[in-house]
Every structure is written in C-alpha cells, then in structure tokens.
Amino acid sequence: MINLLSRTIMMGTPLLFGAIAEVIAERAGVMVTAIEGIFLMGAWAGFVGGYLSGSLTVGFISAILAGLLVAALYGWICIYLKQHQVVTGVAMNILTVGLSAFLYRVIFGVPITPLTVNPLATIPIPLLSQIPVIGQILFNQNILTYAIYLLAPLSYFMLYKTSVGLTIRSAGENPEAVDVAGINVLTVRFITVLLAGVMGGVAGAFYSIGFLGMFSTNIIGGRGWIAFAICFLGNWNPKGAVIGTLAFGFAEAIAIYMQSIGNNALFPNELFIAIPYIMTIILTVSRKSFSVPAKLGVPYIKEN
C-alpha cells in the first residue's frame, strides 16, 4: 500500500502540471485543446534532447521549447486569428502524432532495440524521508514531483490573491473590463497559453525521460486529455486540480501495479489500463454543475 500511494503521487505529477496549466489558461478564456499534442511533443523533444546530449537537463529544456512552439502556434491561430479552439486543437493533436513519429525516424532511423535513457532518480529528503509511512510516500520522490506540489499552492495564490491573477480571471470573465483598464486581452491570453506550453512540455517529458526512459508515439495515450478533464472536474481551481490529480494518479498506479503482478486470470490488463479513462467519463457525467468562466472559448474581438 505504501508503494501504491507513493506511485500515486508520482504518476499524478505530469497530470498536475497539465491540469494547473489548463486551469490558468482557461481562467483567461482559452481552452488549450492542443494539450495532448503539447504533451506528446514534450515527450519527443525531451527524449531526443536527453538521449543525444546525455543530459536530462538538456532534455527538459528541449521539452519546454517544443511545448512553447506548439502552444505559440495554437495561441496565434486561436487568439489572434480567432479560429475555433476545439477544431484547431484536435487538428494539432493529430499533426503532432505524425510529426513526432516522422522526426523520430529521421533522427534515429528504425532501431533494432528500443533506445533508452536513465530516467529521473528519486531524491529522498533528509530526515523527512525517514518518517514512517508518510516519509516514504511524500518525501522520496523525484525533483519534478516536489516542484509541482510547491507550484500548486503558488498558482492558487497567484490566481486569487494577486493583481496578475485578477487580470487573468477577468480576461476569461469580462475581457471588456480588462481592455478598458488599458490591458491587452489578447496578450494576457497568449501568455497563459505559452505558460501551458511550458508546463505541458515538462509534463510530456516526465513520461519519456522522467519515468519510462524511452519514447514511443503512443507514450501519452490520452493523458493530456485527462489533465484537460481534471481542470473541468476541479472547477477551474488549483485546489480541485490537486484533488482530481490524486484520484487519477491512484487509478493509474493501480493499473500499473495490476499489470506488474500479471494478475489477468479474471480481468485482462486492458481493463486496468482503461481505469483512468473510465473514471474520466463517470466523473464528468456525475458532475451536476460547473463554474465555467463566462467567456471560455470565445474569441475576443475589440469593438471600435
């Protein structure tokens, strides 16, 4: 059980990166429906950078740049060209699947055996990691896990306790008021999308070089959409995102555990793999109400 809970925290790390990024962007009025593609390109760039350089740091920097590039393209199309956010995001998600596979083959050809890197190591925090049970669960994780669980409360503070957060939330609720105050609504929205690109790129790289140590075109497997769903289920609030992430992280940890023990006599492995996605459907359907930002998904057109 301790190992399962520890794995829950770890597997929730990339989902929380994506969910908080989505919360901030959607609070500004933009649904980053390209999040699956951002995750995937982050995973691809992270692995390529890490493998070729021999440095995971270079890998994560590469992932951030790849996430930024995808997010910038998405933001330009949706925010400045006023195109449909869902349609654009779906198109970019499809594009990144083919693009990542093509570029991987261009760089590495068709390897006989899978190429691998050493993933992130766990960093036990002195003294705290020695606490019975709690120490093994919370304080024996990798650096990205520590980072995101520090960023989560900071993101809440930024959104609800600072003028920057007020501007972001106003851009999604009443963009005209932001415009009247002399702040460029499009710039605010574009910056939040770029932030989603940075965090989504890191989230994707977590799977390729932070956890598995390898890359494949199906490595993300819909987890970007799960992070997208967590934003909705968490009611566009970092607190809700943390709770939702722990629930989905636990489901994924169970799936990995059941696959590892090979207990498929009664249930096939595919059923356990599907648990997080089944949860997404059930929880979405069961929610009775959502506090949706008033202008979410609505392009802002300044009146003359």
Image (cartoon, rainbow, N blue to C red):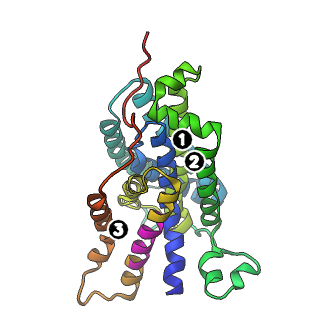
List the residue tagged with mark 3. 276
Mark 2 → mark 1, Cα distance in angstroms: 6 Å
Q: Between tags 3 and 1, which lies in front?
A: 3
Question: In this view of the protein, which residue sits in the foreground, 230 or 293?
Answer: 293
Q: Amino acid at mark 3?
A: Pro
Q: Position of residue 142 (x, y in %)?
A: 63, 69
Against 84, is 183 above or below?
above
Q: Main secondary structure of the magenta part?
A: helix
Q: Report the label total.
A: 3
Q: Quadrant of residue 29?
A: top left
In the rendered image, which quarter contains the C terminus? top left
Q: Position of residue 281 (x, y in %)?
A: 27, 61
Question: In this view of the protein, which residue sits in the foreground, 270 or 9?
Answer: 9
Q: Amino acid at mark 2?
A: Ile
Q: Are marks 3 and 2 in contact (CB under 8 Å)?
A: no
Residue 249 on the magenta span = yes
List the residue tagged with mark 2. 64
Relative to 274, is 245 on the left or the right?
right
Point out which mark residue 68 bears.
Answer: 1
**In percent of the image, x 49 and y 66: which residue is there?**
12
**In percent of the image, x 49 and y 69: which residue is there?**
11
**In percent of the image, x 58 and y 59: which residue is there?**
51
Q: Position of residue 242 (x, y in %)?
A: 51, 62
**Element on which disc 3 rests:** helix
**Bounds of the magenta span?**
245-254
Point out which mark residue 152 bears.
Answer: none
Residue 103 on the magenta span = no
Q: Are marks 2 and 1 in contact (CB under 8 Å)?
A: yes
Q: Amino acid at mark 1?
A: Leu
Mark 3 → mark 1, Cα distance in angstroms: 27 Å
Against 199, is 244 above or below?
below
